[in-house]
Image (cartoon, rainbow, N blue to C red):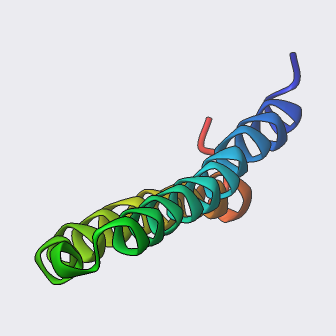
Amino acid sequence: MDPESARFIGAGLACLGMGLAGIGVGTIFGNFLSGAMRNPSAAPGQFTNLVLGFALTEALGIFSLAVALILLFVPLQF
């Protein structure tokens, strides 16, 4: 396989992480809202967990973006 085409395949696979992070953020907020509607008095106690889960999930998406950009724009060294 050509190294250039392998870079593009790797960058495309790294971009999957961004989409999956978006799905994860939606799941986190959806479950929080579902629990908050079921038991509104417990919602403030779970807000810290919501923010922590959002931050970690979003960080993984940003890391996958960084990997994709590195694969695309850093020159190959042979």
Q: Quadrant of residue 56?
A: bottom left
Does residue 16 appear to the left or right of 40 in the view shown?
right
Q: Position of residue 34 (x, y in %)?
A: 47, 64
Quarter in which the C terminus is drawn: top right
Does residue 73 appear to the left or right of 46 in the view shown?
right
Q: Position of residue 63 (x, y in %)?
A: 45, 60
Foreground pick, 36 / 23: 36
Residue at x 49%, y 67% (from the top left corner): 62
Quarter in which the N terminus is drawn: top right
| Residue that extends furthest to the top in the rendered view of this protein | 1
Q: Position of residue 16 (x, y in %)?
A: 70, 45
Residue at x 27%, y 77% (from the top left corner): 51
Foreground pick, 47 / 63: 47
Foreground pick, 1 / 11: 11
Does residue 9 appear to the left or right of 77 in the view shown?
right
Q: Position of residue 59 (x, y in %)?
A: 39, 66
From what the image shows, is residue 9 above or below residue 70?
A: above
Residue at x 53%, y 54% (from the top left corner): 24
Does residue 11 appear to the left or right of 32 in the view shown?
right
Foreground pick, 31 / 7: 31
Residue at x 11%, y 76% (from the top left corner): 45
Number of disc labels: 0
